[in-house]
Image: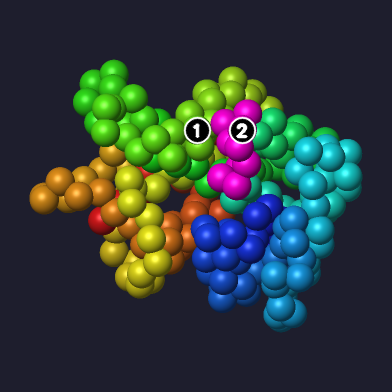
């Protein structure tokens, strides 16, 4: 497939880029700093500003799917920036006529008890709260989207570099934990699951989750 990957040089974006290329997909990497990426077979790299919706739409045109690994972690106003950036990505995807959008989400909006989301628990790390609230906002906005075929993948509470095992569980709205109460996934297995979803859609217009 010919896919556009926004945020292709980031932590999760890099894993998605590697997974997609390893499967023979053609990837257009749309990044803020193209110099971070080296030439690679199947990879095209372009500078982008997600807030420039018209320009972004031009860059997305002609692709079969868009994957957004956009993140506002480096911004002081991370929640607002994440919301504005993702809204522009959604609008540009529709403007470009690309039928599918896969969004890298967070774990904060997953339930840990009936009606209680992880981001609202007392021990949720303060440094990640803005991003988590932004992710929840984006998910709620996507759920009002009636024309675009979107999918949102929430990772486990801890996502970190590790192995590509191919052995994990997929879930829905609840935070997945193991028998010891841990919730973790490697970034490599997260990327595997999202590219699986790209190739064989199973979660159209809904969120799913992943953990060991």
Q: Secondary structure at mark 2?
A: loop
Q: Please identify the dominant SS of the magenta region.
A: loop
Q: Which residue is mark 2?
A: 77
Residue 10: x, y in percent?
Answer: 59, 59
Q: Which residue is mark 1?
A: 130
Alpha-carbon distance for marks 1 and 2? 8 Å
The question of residue 105 being in magenta is answered with no
Ranked by sequence position, the earlier of labels 1 and 2 is 2
The picture places residue 11, in percent across and down from the top left corner, at: 53, 60
Is residue 19 in view from this perspective? yes
Which quarter of the rendering shows the C terminus?
Answer: bottom left
Q: Are marks 1 and 2 in contact (CB under 8 Å)?
A: yes
Q: Residue at x 58, y 24 (%)?
A: 141
Q: Measuring 38% from the left and 61% from the top, which residue is drawn there?
A: 160
Locate the N terminus by quadrant. bottom right
Identity of the residue drawn at 36% across and 69% down? 162
Where are the magenta residues, as a range?
72-80
In the picture, the disc for residue 61 is: none
Question: Residue 209's spot in the image, x, y percent?
Answer: 37, 43
Q: Identify the residue at horizontal 70%, vertical 72% (top origin).
A: 37
Q: Which residue is most to the left? A: 179
Q: Residues within 10 Å of mark 2 (few under 14, many from 20)?
A: few
- Give the quadrant of residue 189: bottom left
């Amino acid at each position: 497939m010919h896919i556009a990957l926004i945020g292709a040089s980031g932590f999760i974006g890099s894993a998605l880029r590697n997974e997609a290329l390893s499967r023979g997909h053609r990837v257009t990497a749309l990044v803020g700093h193209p110099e971070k990426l080296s030439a690679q077979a199947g990879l095209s790299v372009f500078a982008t500003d997600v807030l420039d919706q018209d320009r972004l739409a031009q860059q997305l045109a002609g692709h079969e799917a868009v994957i957004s690994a956009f993140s506002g972690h480096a911004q002081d106003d991370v929640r607002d920036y994440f919301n504005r950036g993702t809204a522009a990505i959604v609008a540009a995807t529709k403007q470009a006529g690309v039928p599918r959008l896969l969004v890298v989400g967070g774990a904060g909006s997953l339930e840990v008890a009936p009606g209680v989301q992880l981001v609202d628990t007392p021990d949720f790390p303060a440094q990640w709260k803005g991003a988590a609230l932004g992710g929840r906002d984006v998910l709620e906005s996507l759920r009002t989207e009636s024309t675009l075929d979107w999918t949102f993948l929430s990772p486990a509470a801890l996502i970190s570099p590790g192995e590509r095992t191919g052995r994990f569980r997929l879930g829905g709205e609840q935070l997945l934990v193991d028998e010891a109460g841990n919730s973790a996934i490697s970034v490599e297995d997260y990327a595997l699951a999202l590219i699986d979803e790209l190739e064989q859609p199973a979660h159209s217009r809904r969120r799913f989750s992943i953990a060991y």
